[in-house]
Image (cartoon, helix red, strand yellow):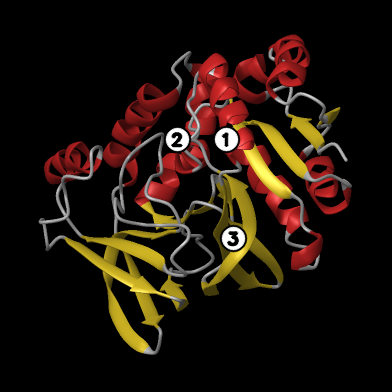
Amino acid sequence: MSMRISVIINPEAGSGAGGRALPTLKTALPEICPGADLSYLPTKSKAHAVELGATVDSDLIVVVSGDGTIHDVAQGLMRRPQMERPRLAMLPVGSGNDIGRTFGMPGDLKHALATLGASVLAERFRPFDVGKVSQGDNQYFLETLSFGVDAAVALNTVTTRQKNAARGLRLYALTAAQTVLHELRPHHFRLVLDGKAVEGDLLICAIQNGPTYGSGFRVTPTADPGDGWLDLCTVNRVSHLHAFYLLSRMKNGNHLSLCPPFSFYRARSIDLSVDEPGDEQIPIQCDGERLLGSSFHIEVVPGALTVLFGM
């Protein structure tokens, strides 16, 4: 029986790179996955991507997108009983591609296709943890959930991308500089990590399933999405100049010894609340998508998905 592969494509990803990839996919995939029963499903909206994740009858879903669409597909997958979830792969064509990095997939489509073919042949499928955010309806994250300045940077990249041709790391660095200059202020956090309380005024609180955010910034370099833990990085109040220095150290994960202002934790269950005056909302992002609220329960769902990893 041939493998059934559903290719979910966001045509708008990467400023249209997803749509432009379709002819290449239709030529390359039958060659690198010989005998596979292939179908191609362009997304029409975020809700449509969630629906496809929840309903597609397939052995393997390959998402051709940036981090946003695979995040949406994962929301749908998590609505299914675990034994009914198709396996998941990604060909990253977006701006940030942090989830693609964690999957071990190159950002160049030609190399990503070659890696996909080799990985399918070698059956490089692994259990993959998912972060769960309970606040009304459950939300899930594959890579990152962050609060404060770094969340503001992630959310502001959308506006910066509309005004500037920058993409990837350059886009994130430009947005980070603008955000640090104009939005650098701490928020008062209360955290309970597996029953242990932590409290303080923080600029950043990043909860990571994978090691990077912001197009490759290695905020928690040792995070492993298959170990059953979430990794946290927090940053205390610092000056503007110091914040720029810390960002430069975070790029390659060279900040682990800078304690303080950094602190690092691991937990399976996290209760988080943040104080804001009046009706003001703290910036919160979940795999680059905006969340609203001031109190959350967060936990890891070990081995929730089966993911195809690259080299």
Look at the numbered discs 2 and 1 and tell me whether their residues touch, using CB distance below 8 Å.
Answer: yes
Q: Which quadrant would residue 198 be assigned to in this image?
A: bottom left
Look at the numbered discs 2 and 3 and tell me whether their residues touch, using CB distance below 8 Å.
Answer: no
Disc with the residue nearer the chain's start (2 vs 3): 3
Disc number for residue 311 = 2
Picture coordinates of residue 78, whole percent (x, y) = 73, 61
Q: Residue at x 13, y 40 (%)?
A: 241
Q: Nearer the viewer, mark 1 or mark 3?
A: 1
Look at the numbered discs 1 and 3 and tell me whether their residues touch, using CB distance below 8 Å.
Answer: no
Foreground residue among 92 and 170: 92
Label 1 vs label 3: CA separation? 38 Å
Where does label 3 land, which residue? Answer: 292
Residue type indicated by callout 3: Leu
Could you tell me which quadrant the N terminus lies in? top right
Picture coordinates of residue 219, whole percent (x, y) = 31, 49
Foreground residue among 250 and 179: 250
Disc number for residue 119 = 1
